[in-house]
Amino acid sequence: MPKMGESIIEATILKWTKKVGEPVAQDETILEIATDKVDSEIPSPVTGVLSEILFPEDSVVAVGKVVAIILTEGESAVAITSPAVEVPISTEVTSQVIAKEIEVVSDQIAIQPTSGNTRFYSPLVKSMAKEERISEVELDKIQGSGANGRVTKQDMLTYIEQRQSHPNVTAEPVLQPKPLNEGILSPTSPSNFVNTQASGNVEIIEMDRMRRLIADHMVMSKQTSPHVTSFVESDVTNLVIWREKNKKRFLEKYGENITFTPLFIHAIVRAIKEFPMINASLDGNRIIVKKDIHIGMAAALPSGNLIVPVVRNADLLNLAGLAKSVNDLANRARQNKLKPEEIKEGTFTLTNVGTFGNLMGTPIINQPQVAIMATGVIKKKPAVLETEYGDVIAIRHMMFLSMSYDHRIVDGGLGGAFLKRVSDLLESFDPGTDV
């Protein structure tokens, strides 16, 4: 199971696209997985024959765990030793092999519910039942549509939806030991709120898994980093004029639409090179300054959730390369086709609140980064210009930039200077820049 990102420790197997005994080519998709952030197709690392599948569909598997065995050329499923030579087997090696087989079997063993039923439930189903407080007795009553009547993820989602639409139906109580600190809200458990009974004209909407994780991540970030937010107003008239003048030519030359996002990223990258401490993270008492500049860009999904694909090595890309990368990531994010490696290892994040017509925002840091910038809507406003003939009032394209930063590492001087430098770079953009 590949590593999906810095905060991802497990993934759910959605589907095996190959069966045991079938040949597979290198880079050919053999299974589909889902994390809390993205669904992905996992390719085979080698060419060979799929010999064994260790985890069934709907299983939740830890990152780094072996999920299948592929025999390559020259290998066989059962090793046959020569009868003329007796190979001594190390007791230590034998113990390790036995322990591994026990581990594999234990991961697939059926749960033994209190009702005496030996029905198999995948780790994902058990996790969903625990989150929704569905008892084992209640779980046994759910009709499964999977193989041999197995309860699938979709069965659980359907049952939960029906369960919520019939609030008068009382579920079997889930017997759990009473915690010693019951009634005390833990600062590290953002979902540990006192249950209240909804009344009146209300609609109850359960958070999906991704929204719950976003909520937990946001609370964790606020509890981890002392947030400070700085603001600056920027005159981006030259930028707007250049884009309006060249967007058609840019499309004809590169086959890409030029939006403001790559222009913002281009300025951010140049500012990071001058203020490298912004491109860092904190590990205990150690400040880790990143040499690579990977810019995350917050993108809204059709579901209303957010995901942050990463433009890797943004400092090595010109404006055309940034536009191509930004458009590609944004389009595939909306189609839920991002790859796991495309949402990890960001070192600085940009979010565009101006997309929704907002003037400015106070974004929450995307841990373990130390800063995040928000760009507001660009509006025409009267502004004072200094000319050789004196000050004049003119109509200019103005926008607010805001940046939240971790005050453990970034002081107001550094944060303010960096933000002002980004603004200066946007304001000084040459409207005569060639496409």
Image (cartoon, rainbow, N blue to C red):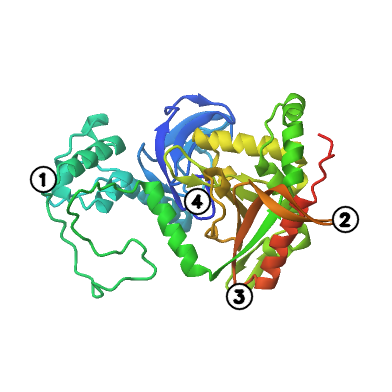
Decide: few, some or many residues near mark 2? Use Cα within 10 Å; few <14, some 14-19, many ≥20: few
Of pointers 2 and 4, the one earlier in the residue sequence? 4
Q: Name the residue: 40% across, 36% down.
A: 14
Residue corresponding to mark 1: 169
State which tag comes first along the sequence, 4 or 3: 4
For marks 1 and 3, give the CA distance: 53 Å
Q: Are marks 4 and 3 in contact (CB under 8 Å)?
A: no
Residue highlighted by disc 2: 389
Q: Nearer the viewer, mark 2 or mark 3?
A: 2
Which of 433/86 is in front? 433
Between marks 1 and 3 in the image, the one whose residue lies nearer the viewer: 1
For disc 3, the neighbor class at 10 Å (few under 14, some 14 to 19, many from 20) is few
Q: Nearer the viewer, mark 4 or mark 3?
A: 3
The amino acid type, in three-letter code, at marker 4 is Pro
Label of residue 88 in the image: 4
Q: Secondary structure at mark 4?
A: loop
Locate the C terminus and report the quarter of the image it occupies: top right
Front of the two marks 2 and 4:
2
Q: What is the number of the mark on residue 285?
A: 3
Residue 225 lies, with reference to residue 342, above or below; the image says below
As measured in the structure, the alpha-carbon distance from the residue carrying label 2 to the one carrying label 3 is 54 Å
